[in-house]
Image: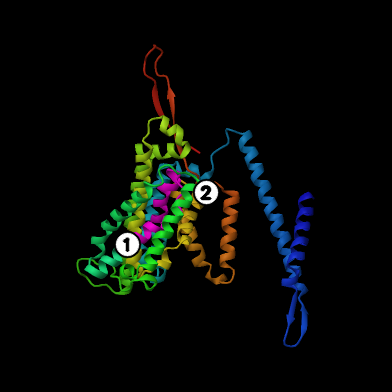
């Protein structure tokens, strides 16, 4: 009853606030006033239902937390139990690989193009995940490295006729170089201060590209950028889209493999130590400067690669493609998916790219629905869709004699 009462009060409050906008319509030509009372009814009904559902979900979440706290031996969720089953994992990966390979052969060029864009953001999200998710360095200027890769290919192709495969490693190296350039001045910064400096770095790159007309052609951008080639073969537009899809599929697999290996490596653990407590990290003898610079350089490398692919995909770039909103969008992918989680970032990229695309049927409300879904996810899953799993080890005594070395057993992953 208490929830119903609160929902009724919120509903009445919404009706009062929206009354002038939703009910009264003044026709200045005929000097008449139209009273749309049905709109007020729908606003009240909608606010009441949403408020009630919201309270019900919050209550369920609190009950779930209380139950989890009281019952430590509760069984694992179904998804975790299935993921722990080897045969299920193999079967799921086989199905996923088959779908990924045959996708361009089954679906249209438009759908293939959308999936290529999604995979591009998967690479960007995984790159930023190194900096933000693993090392805990808030980077709001990540799009600058993306722009460096894109303009590297566009300018080298325009002036020197260099092809996609030649410029791809160059874009990665330039991204890493600019990552180091950003990393040096911010070695002593963290938190909000680091965010402001990286935001400024991203804005500087965009302003340079906008105003240095002789170098970047300014706001007009660079057009007619060559698509990726294959030993001199000429592709139609449809074939180029399919070819680029497979290139991105390969890049995504390489990125997942490299980022996963980095996460489990010594440097990956140093990043996580830096994220948890910078002072304790230093006290343990970890070189903070080297760790931060490596995080910025490796994160920027993937942005440089993605930038080259983006320029080849669109065949046209200008500074409007690399604004702060793009950085915020990539950061949203990491936060929504789960900071530090590879699977979470992949899911986040698929949701944030595909959801607005397939909600075009609700063209007037799709961004409203998109925002509402993001708010719901952040309220009920603040740690992201897939929470970062921390591996832990159990140390067990194997012998009774003094001085015998204990056995260290990997116990799995801890939420």
Q: Which mark is residue 219?
A: none
The reply, left or right, for residue 162 in relation to residue 115 is left
Q: Quadrant of residue 236?
A: bottom left
Viewer-nearest of discs 2 and 1: 1
Residue occupying image coordinates x 39% and y 71%: 219
Instruction: Give 384 or 174, whichever is nearer the viewer.
Output: 174
Q: Quadrant of residue 75?
A: top right
Q: Earlier in the sequence, mark 2 or mark 1?
A: 1
User: What percent of the width, then of the height, locates residue 213?
Assistant: 34, 70
The reply, left or right, for residue 67 in relation to residue 76 is right
Provide the residue designation for mark 2: 384
Q: Main secondary structure of the magenta part?
A: helix
The reply, left or right, for residue 367 in relation to residue 329 is right
Q: 10 Å neighbourhood of mark 2: few (<14), some, or many (≥20)? A: many
Residue occupying image coordinates x 74% and y 65%: 17
Q: 10 Å neighbourhood of mark 1: few (<14), some, or many (≥20)? A: many
Find out whether residue 287 is within the magenta segment.
no
Residue occupying image coordinates x 60% and y 49%: 380
User: What percent of the width, then of the height, locates residue 209?
Assistant: 37, 65
Q: SS of the residue at dot 2? A: loop
> How far, Cα to Cα, is label 2 from label 1?
29 Å
| Figure disc tally | 2
How is the protein colored in the picture? rainbow
Provide the residue designation for mark 1: 308
**Visible residue check, residue 336:** yes
Residue farthest along the left direction in this orientation = 231
User: What percent of the width, then of the height, locates residue 95?
Assistant: 39, 54
**Visible residue check, residue 119:** no
Extent of the magenta region:
122-149
């Amino acid at each position: 009853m208490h929830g119903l009462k609160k929902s009724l009060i919120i509903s009445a409050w919404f009706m009062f606030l929206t009354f002038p906008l939703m009910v009264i319509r003044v026709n200045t030509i005929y000097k008449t006033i139209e009273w749309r009372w049905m709109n007020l009814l729908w606003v009240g009904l909608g606010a009441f239902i949403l408020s009630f559902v919201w309270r019900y979900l919050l209550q369920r979440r609190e009950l779930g937390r209380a139950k989890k706290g009281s019952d430590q031996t509760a069984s694992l969720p179904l998804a975790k139990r299935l993921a722990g089953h080897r045969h299920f994992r193999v079967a799921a990966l086989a199905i996923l690989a088959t779908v990924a390979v045959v996708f361009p052969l089954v679906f249209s060029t438009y759908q293939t193009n959308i999936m290529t864009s999604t995979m591009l953001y998967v690479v960007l999200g995984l790159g930023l995940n190194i900096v933000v998710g693993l090392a805990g360095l808030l980077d709001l200027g990540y799009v600058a490295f993306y722009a460096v890769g894109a303009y590297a290919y566009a300018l080298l192709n325009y002036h020197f006729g260099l092809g996609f495969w030649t410029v791809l490693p160059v874009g990665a190296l330039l991204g890493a170089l600019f990552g180091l350039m950003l990393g040096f001045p911010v070695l002593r910064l963290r938190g909000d201060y680091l965010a402001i400096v990286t935001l400024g770095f991203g804005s500087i790159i965009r302003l340079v590209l906008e105003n240095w007309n002789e170098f970047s052609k300014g706001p007009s951008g660079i057009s007619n950028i060559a698509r990726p080639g294959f030993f001199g073969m000429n592709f139609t537009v449809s074939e180029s889209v399919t070819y680029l899809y497979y290139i991105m599929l390969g890049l995504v697999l390489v990125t997942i493999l490299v980022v996963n290996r980095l996460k489990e490596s010594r440097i990956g653990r140093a990043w996580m130590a830096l994220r948890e407590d910078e002072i304790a990290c230093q006290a343990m003898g970890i070189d903070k400067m080297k760790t931060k610079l490596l995080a910025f350089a490796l994160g920027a490398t993937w942005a440089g690669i993605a930038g080259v692919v983006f320029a080849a995909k669109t065949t046209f770039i200008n500074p409007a493609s690399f604004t702060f909103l793009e950085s915020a969008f990539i950061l949203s992918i990491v936060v929504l998916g789960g900071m530090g989680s590879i699977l979470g970032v992949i899911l986040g990229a698929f949701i944030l790219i595909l959801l607005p695309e397939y909600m075009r049927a609700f063209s007037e409300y799709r961004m409203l629905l998109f925002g509402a879904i993001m708010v719901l996810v952040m309220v009920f899953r603040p740690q992201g869709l897939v929470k970062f799993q921390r591996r832990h080890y159990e140390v067990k005594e194997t012998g009774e004699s003094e001085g015998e070395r204990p056995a260290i057993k990997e116990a799995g992953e801890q939420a």
